[in-house]
Amino acid sequence: MKCDFYDCTSKATHKIYYEGVKEEFTTCKKHLSFMKDALIRYVISKFYKNKYNIFSGKTAFELSSTYGCPLYLTRLRCEENNLFLDELEYVVEMRKHKEKSRKVKNG
Ligand SMILES: [Zn+2]
């Protein structure tokens, strides 16, 4: 499997499967951050562009917790697309997540 980066020749790749759009990205280690950015752009274009002006904080949290897409990057791409990132919802999701993992730890 070849890395999705246009001129990459690396064969050591892994897949990022994004459940929300049932889409798979193939990336090598070197282009991982590029692919994370591509994933954010893809999610924005797929769901939000010309549709709503609010980008779900829940989606932003999912992108960061599951796929390692940094919040600042999601925020930046939102700004470029004239979207308002619901950071309050992001914080709420983060708290829920922390609460869940604490419960798991304590049994
Ligand atoms: Zn690559």
Image: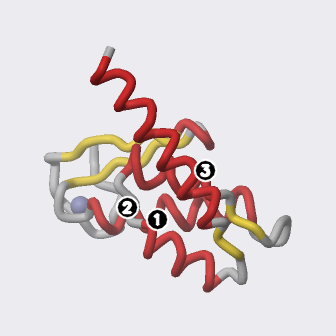
Q: Are there few (<14), some (14-19), or many (20+) residues within 10 Å of tag 2? A: many
From this view, report whether residue 90 is shown above or below residue 102. below
Q: Quadrant of ligand 1?
A: bottom left
Quick one: label 2 or label 3, which is nearer the N terminus? 2
Q: Amino acid at mark 3?
A: Lys
- Pointers 1 and 2 in contact (C-beta within 8 Å): yes
Residue depicted at 72% across the width and 83% down the height: 82
Q: Nearer the viewer, mark 3 or mark 1?
A: 3
Q: Which mark is residue 58?
A: 3
Residue depicted at 25% across the width and 42% down the height: 14
Q: Amino acid at mark 1?
A: Ala
Question: Residue 28 lies in what quarter of the image?
Answer: bottom left
Please, what secondary structure does the residue beneath circle 2 have? helix
Which residue carries the number 2 mark? 35
Residue depicted at 62% across the width and 83% down the height: 79
Q: Residue furthest right?
A: 51
Ligand 1 contact, mark 2 (Cβ < 8 Å): no
Task: Decide if residue 31 is on the left or right side of residue 90.
Answer: left
